[in-house]
Image (tube, helix red, strand yellow):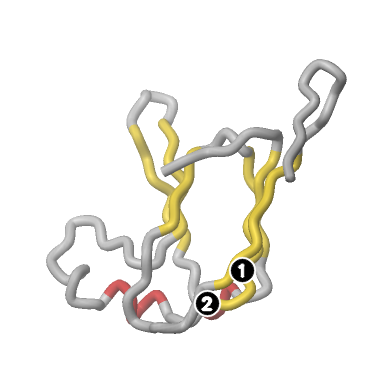
């Protein structure tokens, strides 16, 4: 689980070599209380301070889709098991550079 510097972060999914239904029925998920193979998740607290997870079931149908979210929002992606092919995504952060905080990313 991690977050980023900047104002906004994004993920664009280019290639996803699996389907969520296959991932969540994989043997390592069968007896799990929280099966998470291949999921993209945001983690935050609700108004009562309880930790909550917003799970996004990203699979082949998400190819070509981009999401943007506040860079400070904690998130994570879980590994997949039903394919030996590559999951390809493009991600980045939008940062406002000022004289006070000259961010330099290379």
Q: Quadrant of the C terminus?
A: top right
Task: Give the residue at x 25% y 77%.
Answer: 25
Percent coordinates x, y for residue 97 in the rendering: 82, 29
Badge 2 marks a residue whose secondary structure is loop
Of the pair 55 and 72, the residue shown nearer to us:
72
Task: Give the residue at x 70% y 35%.
Answer: 7
Q: Residue furthest front?
A: 106
Percent coordinates x, y for residue 44 in the rendering: 44, 36
Q: Are marks 1 and 2 in contact (CB under 8 Å)?
A: yes
Of the pair 34 and 7, the residue shown nearer to us:
7
Using the rendered view, name the quadrant where residue 96 is placed.
Answer: top right
Percent coordinates x, y for residue 43 in the rendering: 43, 41
Which mark is on residue 16?
2
In the image: residue 6, left or right of residue 101: left
In the image: residue 75, left or right of residue 29: right
Which mark is on residue 35?
none
């Amino acid at each position: 689980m991690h977050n980023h510097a900047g104002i906004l972060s994004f993920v664009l999914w280019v290639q996803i070599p699996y389907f969520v239904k296959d991932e969540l029925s994989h043997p390592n998920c069968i007896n799990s209380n929280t099966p998470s193979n291949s999921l993209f998740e945001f983690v935050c607290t609700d108004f009562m301070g309880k930790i909550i997870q917003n799970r996004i079931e990203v699979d082949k149908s998400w190819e070509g889709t981009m999401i943007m979210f506040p860079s400070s929002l904690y998130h994570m992606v879980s590994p997949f098991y039903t394919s030996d092919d590559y999951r390809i995504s493009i991600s980045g952060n939008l940062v406002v550079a000022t004289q006070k905080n000259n961010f330099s990313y290379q």
